Amino acid sequence: MEFGIWNLEFGIWNLGFGIWNLEFGTWNLVLGIWNFLQLMSKRIIGTYTEGNPGPLLICIGGIHGNEPAGIQALERVFQLIDEEPEKNPQFEFFGTLVGLRGNIAALNKKERYITKDLNRQWTPQNLQRIKNTPTDQLDAEDREMKELHDCIQKCIDRHPPTKLILMDLHTTTAHGGIFSIATDERESQVIATELKAPVVRGLLDGIDGTTLHYFNTKNIGIDTVAVCFESGQHDELDSIDNAVAAIINCLRSVGCVAPHNIENKHDERLIKYSANLPKITDLVYCHDIHEGDNFVMQPGYDNFQFIKKDELLAHDKNGEIRSKEDALILMPLYQKQGNDGFFLIKKVEDF
């Protein structure tokens, strides 16, 4: 009889322990969901939709932590769109606009990156490695990439689109003009052209692992196109306004907003800042920087500045770096972090 009572008490104790384990597991699940929602709230700048079918336009600002203009532009765009239905009762929005912060850790430190350039990591192989690695074993940019990718996938699941368009917003260390970068896909080049800024072709051949390399139909599994917009110099207030104009023009280009609902001032602004710049250029050279090169750019160069063959452009541990041909210079490096010293481009004469 005593043995039976002992077994009964032991069974009740096990039941209580099991219930406690269930409650603990539920608490862990709730905590995990809460942590994810916290991450999403830090990552997402804004979302706008009226429930009409259409494309999903995802704009990323600050994938480099010292380039906050894209984030500030997106904040302004969401404010403008929220106000638009009151100002214009005929306003209609098709699909969904989502704005995301890129490298949050680097943004908090106002540095290009923490351990490595986040916009050189976007390859299917690298993403698979990150997915298979415990979070506590990932470096800062690996974690940012995992969270950013997961967030984009959640946006796709929540707002199933007719097409995904990814717009990556950047600024440069140098002054001297705005421009857009397209992939080899025709639709990307059409969108880039309709942003009313010079289009640089072939730039993706000089670098690897950018968002424009990764976000395509093959990797994402749905109809996908990507484009990049460089809105000016890091610290110029005009860079924010230029990015606002480009985002709004992109909304028109991809069909989220009807053309008659877009003010001409956005076109006019971008055309003004593109004045006297070539409409289309092709990459002819990219100067790679490796660790220990001690690369130092000559001061005073602006984007799209003409340079002559044999002109002194920079120095590194091996001595002088001179131009091998007449060209236009793009994105000369005037910051400590970065893997690209400068790019050389040439005007496409047919345009």
Image (cartoon, grey):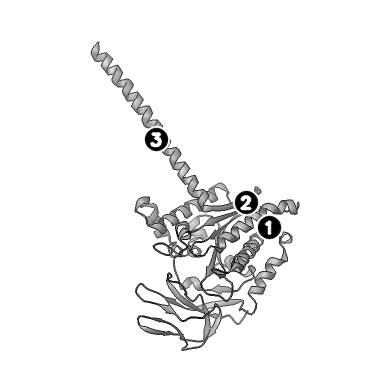
Q: Secondary structure at mark 2?
A: strand
Structural distance between the alpha carbons of marks 1 and 3: 46 Å
- For the residue marked with disc 1, what is the amino acid? Val
**Taking the image as drawn, is residue 195 in sight?**
yes
**Taking the image as drawn, is residue 92 in sight?**
no
Structural distance between the alpha carbons of marks 3 and 2: 35 Å
- Where residue 25 is drawn, which disc sits there? 3
Q: Which residue is mark 2?
A: 48
Q: Earlier in the sequence, mark 1 or mark 3?
A: 3
Structural distance between the alpha carbons of marks 2 and 1: 12 Å
Give the side of residue 271 with respect to residue 170, left or right.
right
Question: Where, quadrant-wise, is the N terminus in this rendering?
Answer: top left
Crowding at dot 3, Cα within 10 Å, few <14 / some 14-19 / many 20+, comes out as few
Q: Which residue is mark 1?
A: 257
The structure residue drawn at horizontal position 58% and vertical position 52%, both measured from the top left corner, is: 46
Give the quadrant of residue 255: bottom right
Q: Secondary structure at mark 1?
A: loop
**In the image, residue 164 above or below residue 236:** above
Q: Earlier in the sequence, mark 3 or mark 2?
A: 3
Q: Secondary structure at mark 3?
A: helix
> How far from the left and from the top, in percent, is residue 178?
59, 72
> How far from the left and from the top, in percent, is residue 323?
46, 85
Of tags 1 and 3, the one toward the viewer is: 3
